Image (cartoon, rainbow, N blue to C red):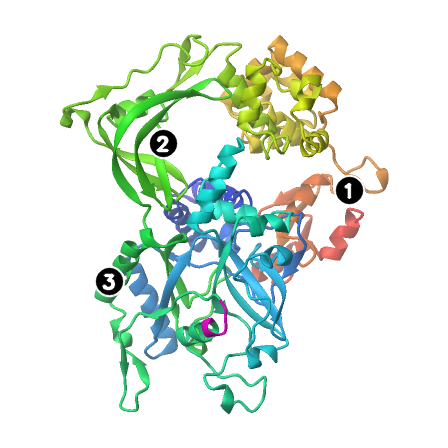
Amino acid sequence: MNQQEAKQRMEELTKQLNHYNYRYYVDHFSEVSDQEFDTMMRELQELERQYPEMVADDSPTKRVGSDLQQEFKHVKHQVPMLSLANAYSVDELLQWYEGVKAVNGEDVAIAYEPKYDGLSISLIYKYGRLTQAVTRGDGVQGDDVTENVKMIERVPLVINEPNIKACPIFEIRGEVLMPFKSFAKLNAQREANGEEPFANPRNAAAGTLKSTRSSVVRERCLDVYLYEVTSTYRIPKNPAMVKDDHEFWENDQCDLMNYLFGKGVPTAQSFHVGYCAKDGNGNRTIDTDCFDRERLEYVINDFVLRRPLMDYPIDGIVFKVAARHQRSLCGSTSKAPKWAIAYKFNAERMITTVRDVTFQVGRTGQVTPVVHFDPIPLAGTLVRKATGNNADFLHDMHIAIGGQIEVEKGGEIIPKIVVGVDPCATKDFKEVAYPKYCPECGAPLVKDGSNHYCIGESCPAQLQARLEHFVSRDAMNIQGVGPRMIEEWIGDGIVKDVADIYESEKLETFFSTRIILSRTESKSVPAHRVLFALGIRYVGASTAKLLLKHYGSINTLVAIATACPEQLMQIDGVGENTATSLSQWFSDKENLELLSRLQAIGLQMEEKIAHPSGTTQKPLAGLTIVISGVFEQHSRDEYRAMIEQYGGKNGSSVSKNTNYILAGDNMGPAKREKAEQLGIEIINEEQFLKMIGQ
């Protein structure tokens, strides 16, 4: 791989990994498994090691994924809230241990505990009383969710321990999660109300903790397990021997967790990897030599066997240096401490028997097979079906009714067929025949590549999917409208297209005050989300934003797409399929009439840019700005958005084309040195905000 190829690959990996991080931390949705993500991350890290001068400022190797949301106050962590490095084999664990031992220059006791699959939380106590609860956020600052966390029954509002009550600040961190029983109950309620069920307990926990109504947290019965004290104050083994309230003794991880558990704090179970023994004085000792392959395999197998019996979701085991004084020697990277590592379980797989294959029609008319099989428990949920993708997939996987398949949960979220057992090995099986006509409206199906599409103009299934997509959170965000409600509208003939949601007077009887308010608010949704909401094939959320950023108006996009669609392909990220799809959609007379109605209703067709003092000039027009460091007033992602909003361009690295460097704390020395060499001005947060009039 030459330098140019390496640069291109680094840009691809950076863009993809940042996208996955956003979907995971903000949308609470995992598009890939942890192992796939980590493989890509390690490839990027290796390329960055070889070509340090080409490291992008927004590289995901430099930061923790962010779950920051605008609805909550942002709070800076006193100690950065980092993530954990992952391991997928015993060899990787042993390699990590040798590194820890080498740094300390002595034997190191290792503790282990479950890796909970929830949302990281920091609880801050002042003189023993809970005063603040903050999410991980971007690792530097998080969302203040104090009122919501107070609704979690097991979170102690006061810790009745004399030495903690004497502490000005005592911080303990852990994980908020949703027990499987609560998850099953919640999804049953959502399905009964015609709402989309949550994909897994982590999604449900994250969505609940970020609710704007604290009562929802109590109703959904969230739980918490705490596993790490970050306060500089330490818990004594023998409080009677402490002369000063603030003079705390050093502790072992397991001792500390057990001590806090005895004080009513819901701590995680923590165990020593080594075998426990006692010396001649009766004191417990740890045989650190037992951090070997045999012992680790025992610990991992024990967890794998116990995992299905647990009441809460876990996705691995965390190993950490037990003695807190030894951790400081290990240090940390910008993303993770070196004194701890997470062993991640492989995705659970089970073999089951196919009972049926049905076909569902999406909003673009794509007909997708759904494989139904005998229920199997995977990652805490009972799985009954998985997508069959297309006709080629069914054939390649030998999927037949009565045949067997192996299913796993990709990313612990989406059921995925990974192995098909040749149906010839099964006596009683029935081959799957792909339909020639739409299963919903009877219109002919046409094949485009590997996929089949319904060409029926009045297909009710397409309309159902289009309406569900239109009201979804990432599109128009009309809250309170669920699939069953939409199905009833279509059945009664009340709604024939998305504009009817605003125009049909008959709908008022269906609408609650919440829906009416949400529908009104949707008229202020930015134009790029309106474009995404239309459900045009190949136009996802990011592509819609890219197009509107370039053309500024849906009407301008219509003119270009119908007159000269090849111009669209000049935009980086827009390919031939997207350009062709846009051209075809905007050339349809009925679609143009629909757009006209939506514009008359008041939906945004222009991508509005806020300008200071009512001016129309973009203050950063023509300027390239590189962001470096850690900021207090806004996150890095927020500053990137501001740069684009005010006409500027985000630079990935410092070059002669860079106009300014927006620098926060801990700016990279290499960037500073290069800026000085090129004479590039370095500005701080206050100077930048003045530039854009804030």
The picture places residue 629, in percent across and down from the top left corner, at: 61, 58
**Residue 375, quarter of picture:** top left
Cα gap from disc 2 to disc 3, whole angstroms: 33 Å
- Describe the element under mark 1 as helix, strand or loop: loop
| Label annotation for residue 386 | 2
Note whether residue 667 is visible. no
- Describe the element under mark 3 as helix, strand or loop: helix
The picture places residue 181, in percent across and down from the top left corner, at: 43, 48
Residue designated by label 3: 298
Query: Which comes before the other along the chain, label 2 or label 1?
Result: 2
The picture places residue 467, in percent across and down from the top left corner, at: 57, 23
Question: Residues at badges 2 and 3 in contact (C-beta under 8 Å)?
Answer: no
- Mark 3 neighbour class, 10 Å CA radius: few under 14, some 14 to 19, many 20 or more: few
Q: Which residues are magenta?
A: 261-265
**The disc labelled 1 sits on which kind of residue?**
Pro
**Looking at the image, which is closer to me, 556 or 663?**
556
Q: Is residue 3 above or below residue 404?
A: below
